Image (cartoon, coloured by chain):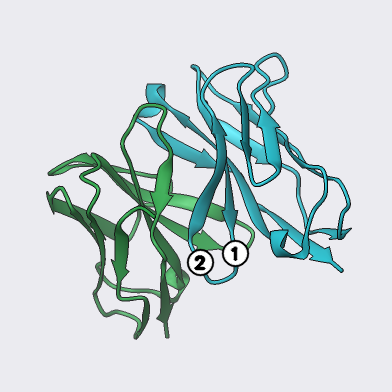
């Protein structure tokens, strides 16, 4: 199994509070991704990174920011959480090119 | 832009039945194609992949062939088991779009004894 961990695995927070989710990899892969998974929508890309300090927006980036200061860590921040951001968040990594993505175990976030 | 369309579920089959889950794609370049499986409460796991036209990916009795002429990558298994119950996602990656991945919406499969 690819070495990807996500923390926390579960979180309940209140509307308006900031939240940071962490993705950590031990594979030294260049690309890292944040997705959210919601019923009826499949996986939707929030942000991705193609190197340290190199990030770009995905399909549903509004209300989210990311940072990557080290190859192994990719942080997702909800600056002011809303109930619409209640979801399961997955981190993924890839070596690029024709290579597959490997997924973390997910973080279930509930915003009340 | 790039996209993946897969058949909607849910799909319910009896054990030992034949499975097909359809997947078609749109891409500007020459994408790599993947099938992922997700069991309840877990992340997605790679099931199989194909990186060029006419390649056949296979794993655990599942197969899919990269058909450029029909832009398809249908998943098949000859005899499903209860343990195959999961959600299946078709996906593509395209280096022309910065190595972004595009996923279908998933097909839920339930196999009954």
Q: Who's the residue at 40% across and 36% down the image?
A: B100
Mark 2 residue crowding within 10 angstroms, few (<14) / some (14–19) / many (20+): few
Position of residue B25 relative to residue A72, above or below, is above
SS class, disc 2: loop
Q: Which residue is mark 1?
A: B39
Q: What color does chain B have in the rendering?
A: cyan
- Name the chain under label 1: B
Seen from this angle, which residue lies furthest top?
B69
Residue depicted at x 51% and y 18%:
B28
Q: Are marks 1 and 2 in contact (CB under 8 Å)?
A: yes
Spatial separation of the CA atoms under disc 1 and disc 2: 6 Å
Q: Position of residue A85 (x, y in %)?
A: 42, 69
Residue B5 horizontal side relative to residue A24, left or right: right
Left or right of A30, for residue B52:
right
Q: Pointer 2 indicates a residue of which chain?
A: B
Q: Position of residue A75 (x, y in %)?
A: 22, 60
Q: Are marks 1 and 2 on the same chain?
A: yes
| Front residue (pair A9, A43) | A9
Residue B50 lies in what quarter of the image? Answer: top right
The image quarter in which residue A74 lies: bottom left
Residue B87, position in %: x, y? 65, 58
In the image as oriented, which residue stretches furthest toward the front?
Answer: B60
Please say whether residue B8 is visible from this viewpoint. Answer: yes
**Residue B30 position in % (x across, y down):** 50, 17
Foreground: B58 or A78? B58
Q: Which mark is residue B42?
A: 2
Q: Colour of chain A?
A: green
Mark number, residue B76: none
Residue at 86% from the left image edge and 60% from the top image edge = B15
Residue B105 visible from this viewpoint: no
């Amino acid at each position: 199994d690819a070495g990807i961990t996500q923390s926390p695995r579960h979180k309940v927070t209140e509307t308006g509070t900031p939240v940071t989710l962490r993705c950590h990899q031990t594979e030294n892969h260049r690309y890292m991704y944040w997705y959210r998974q919601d019923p009826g929508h499949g996986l939707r890309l929030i942000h991705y990174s193609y190197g340290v300090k190199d990030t770009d927006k995905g399909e549903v980036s509004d209300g989210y920011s990311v940072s990557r200061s080290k190859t192994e860590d990719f942080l997702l921040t909800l600056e002011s959480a809303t109930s619409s951001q209640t979801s399961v968040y997955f981190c993924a990594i890839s070596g690029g090119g024709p290579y597959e993505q490997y997924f973390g175990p997910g973080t279930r976030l509930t915003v009340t | 832009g790039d996209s993946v369309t897969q058949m909607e579920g849910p799909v319910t089959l009896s054990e030992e039945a034949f499975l097909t889950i359809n997947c078609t794609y749109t891409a500007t370049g020459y994408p790599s194609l993947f099938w992922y499986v997700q069991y309840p409460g877990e992340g997605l796991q790679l099931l199989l992949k194909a990186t060029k036209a006419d390649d056949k990916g296979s794993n655990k009795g599942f197969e899919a062939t990269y058909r450029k002429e029909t832009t398809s990558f249908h998943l098949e298994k000859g005899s499903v088991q209860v343990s195959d119950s999961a959600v299946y996602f078709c996906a593509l990656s395209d280096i022309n779009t910065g190595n972004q991945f595009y996923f279908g919406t998933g097909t839920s499969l339930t196999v009954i004894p």
